[in-house]
Amino acid sequence: MIEQLKTDFEKILKISNLAKKDIEFKKNHLNKFIESGFPGRKLENWKFLDLNQIIKKDIGELSFYNDYSVTNKVDTSIFIDGLEHNKIIFINGRIEKIDFNYEDENQIEIFDAIKINDKFVNKNSLINLNNAFRNKYYKILVKKGYLTKKPLVIYHLTNEKMKSKNINLRLDFELEQNSSLKLIDFFNDSTDKNFMNILYHFDLKKDSILKNYKIDKSLNKNLKYSFNNIDQEKNSISETFIFSAGSKYFKNEINCNLKGEYSSAFVNGIFSLKENQQHEIRSTINHLVENTKSYQLIKSVLGKNSKAAYQGRIFVNSKAQKTDGYQLSKTILLDETSEFNAKPELEIYADDVKCSHGSASGSLNENSIFYLMSRGLNYKQSKELLINGFMLDVVEKITDSEIKNLIKNMIGLKE
Amino acid sequence: MDTREKDIENLKDYKYGFSTDIENIKAPKGLNEDVIKFISNIKKEPQWMLEFRLNAFKRFKQLKEPNWQKPKYPKIDYQNLYYYSAPKSMKDKPKSLDELDPKLLETYKKLGIPLQEQARLNGIAVDAVFDSVSVATTFKEELTKQGIIFCSMSEAILKHPNLVKKYLGTVIPTTDHFFATLNSAVFTDGSFVYIPEGVKCPMELSTYFRINASETGQFERTLIIADKGSYVSYLEGCTAPMRDENQLHAANVELIALDDAEIKYSTVQNWYPGDENGKGGIYNFVTKRGLCKGKNSKISWTQVETGSAITWKYPSCILKGDNSIGEFYSIAITNNHQKADTGTKMIHLGKNTKSKIISKGISAGFSDMTYRGLVDINSKAENSSNYTQCDSLLMGNKCGAHTVPYIKNKNFKSNIAHEATTSKISEEQLHYCQQRGLSSEEAIGLIVNGFCKEVLQQLPMEFAVEAQKLVGISLEGSVG
């Protein structure tokens, strides 16, 4: 793999004319990645699902070179129906289109050459990989006091050119004071056996609101890793919803730094896994100042041979008095071969706090099924009804009613 | 002064902090094969035991000291420790209590250990371990009548080699982790209990551990075997004198419960915690593991951890037999600069196995407390269930309380429920108590005892009283 990394890296350097400083930066990160390789079970955070092994088993040899000079055709049929939205379209990791048609163009700015913010608390070798190999990246700025009218949908698409490839992409967002942004990540892969490494950085200024919905629904055999770093100032709110169902492997990492008083972070997620899928969510909420709040609800429904893991960490600094931190994970195991692992973690250094976590896992309640069957439903219907109700709980947490209905329709939940 | 105040006065400055001047026989300083041979030789051990030790040592040399735990400590120089220290007068073992060194007896008297008459009144059989050798075992005759073997480990190796050979190292093998393997190589003494088939042990069995000599590590090894249908309740208490340097305590405890047997193991650990500035104190790195080998067996751990500079232990249950039950009740209190990383592991292998974990952590001063636990339900462990509750109480904003549970469910017919909360004593509760005439210290004592009640209830009578006092004393001065 190391040879492949080096030759692919040289290829990229040849065709792109980067500044000397940038080359140094990339080289540095490449060397760091070569040193540590893909993260595996020896690292605490990767204990439950070993990415290194999964890549070896599912993809084999990865290649890291992508030709970003050719444009790809955008297939408009995959666009989300019945929702007016702005678009960013990635095909094979290349940005084909950025379109903010519904917004006031003076209120949104897009930068392409920006100083890299690299000061993440959670470092792992995938971030190094991202730094070394990604194409140029953009920063989107929502100006002071501007509330975006329509949601922004980021399409993550692939086409047949992709085979055993690694894609690295990154976007930065800055929400100025009193602004808001609704963001939907929509994954629709049509090819198999690729590894996507996605990195988002959000900078939330005072009183701003971010809503991020990640929808991975269509079945595919790709592996994905997504890392969201969210820095929050006073009074800001971040809401993250993850529907994790389509990919072969998907790990979502959310890292929230509550740096301003009265800021709050919500992370909700659903795992709905079928045969042989392995998914994970890891949320880290850092309560750094007084009067901050966080809430996490994760529900999983696990089918045959599937495996899900949830690692949720709440950290409370000694200054962060009056913190509220609440976390709950619930799981239904549908088959004898399904497996759920959880590591809810509390690390608390302040005394005037209210923090709790709960975790429960088990099978569907036979009594409830009996109840429904005695009222005329068959076994399959009863089971579906119960599972739908179980998942609906999380979807109901979505605060934007338009998107809530869209997601309900998308994943086939009826009220 | 009422009695409570007197108790506090007595215990405030670590009552057990005296040391006894007794001539000691020590093994040469350092850790090597010669020292292990020396230990084995002085204890007149058979060849197989020496081989067990040397095997463990061979393995130990390949192991690295773990460092994933929360409390960090300065590197221990394993070559700068004495691995064997025994009072000189023990060399020719006394035949009865009357022949014991009077100074030793005095030490135990100060500790409040009932060796002679007191023992009979309390109805507790005591085996006391002083540094590295077991001093005396009371109530031997009465236990022998029932076929119960309760003696020191060294004696068991000589007198009951078949039992020891059969079970030693079956729960904690010589190939285990760093500290357990170190113990397997150099363990000095400890208790051995065998309860024969169908016997309910008529009294509580108890061991008392004390570290006296300086620069020694204490490595005791306890093995308890409950044969089919038997029952035993075992108590363990620990103290150590005040010293400036840190002392290492790395014990191994193995429990084996066969069909329908039940073992109840209670610990009140009150090793010297170091002074207010965190100087000195015991490193308590203990490996405790129970194996529910037979059907319908049950192992229950209860611990009250108030001492030690660093406590790092996870009493565990391996639920191998069908319908077996594992329980873990824990109170851990840290004050000043103490650190604790404790919890349990429940490994469900058999069908219909059940486990319950109740953990209460209280941290005050500059201390740090971590609950770390594992619940692992194997794919074959049908209809198993686990319930975990871990609550933490914080006093002040210089201390920390952490919860790190690992939950693994690989069986869809099994249920796991886990709950954890962290909070402080509310102003309202304090106000309510103070309104009714309690001082703030008394009020806190009352609230904390209420917080711990679920665990204290699990302790045998005599221990519960002591533990309740300890809880109060450990938190002395933590509320300003």
Image (spheres, rainbow, N blue to C red):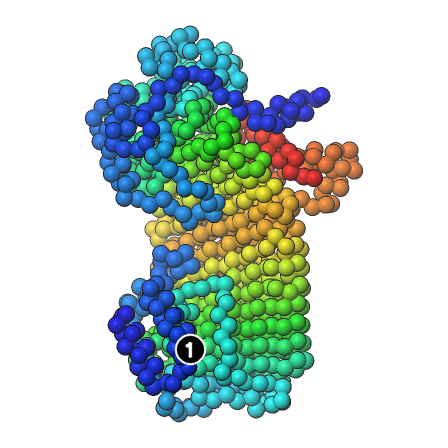
Q: State whether residue A74 is above or below residue B197.
A: below
Task: Output the chain of dot 1.
Answer: A
Residue sitting farthest toward the left: B47
B283 relative position to A108: left or right: left
Numbered disc 1: secondary structure: helix
Q: How many marks?
A: 1
Quick check: can you spot residue B472? yes
Residue sitting farthest toward the top: B98
Coordinates of residue B398 in the picture (x, y in percent): 61, 46
Residue under the point 47% across and 66% down: A253
Coordinates of residue B84 in the picture (x, y in percent): 35, 25
Question: Disc 1 designates what residue?
Answer: A22
Coordinates of residue B433 in the picture (x, y in percent): 74, 38
Camera-nearest residue between B111 and A270: B111
Residue type at mark 1?
Answer: Asp
Displayed quadrant of residue A275: bottom left
Within 10 Å of the Cα at label 1, are there few (<14), some (14-19), or many (20+) other Cα atoms? few
Q: State whether residue B178 is above or below residue B188.
A: below
Residue under the point 40% across and 47% down: B67
Camera-nearest residue between A280 and A27: A27
Residue under the point 31% across and 20% down: B155
Q: State whether residue A381 is above or below residue A68.
A: above
Residue under the point 51% across and 86% down: A87
Residue sitting farthest toward the front: A20
Coordinates of residue A225 in the picture (x, y in percent): 42, 70
Quick check: can you spot residue B224? no
Q: State whether residue B397 is above or below residue B242.
A: below
Q: Quadrant of the C terminus of chain B?
A: top right
Q: Quadrant of the N terminus of chain B?
A: top right
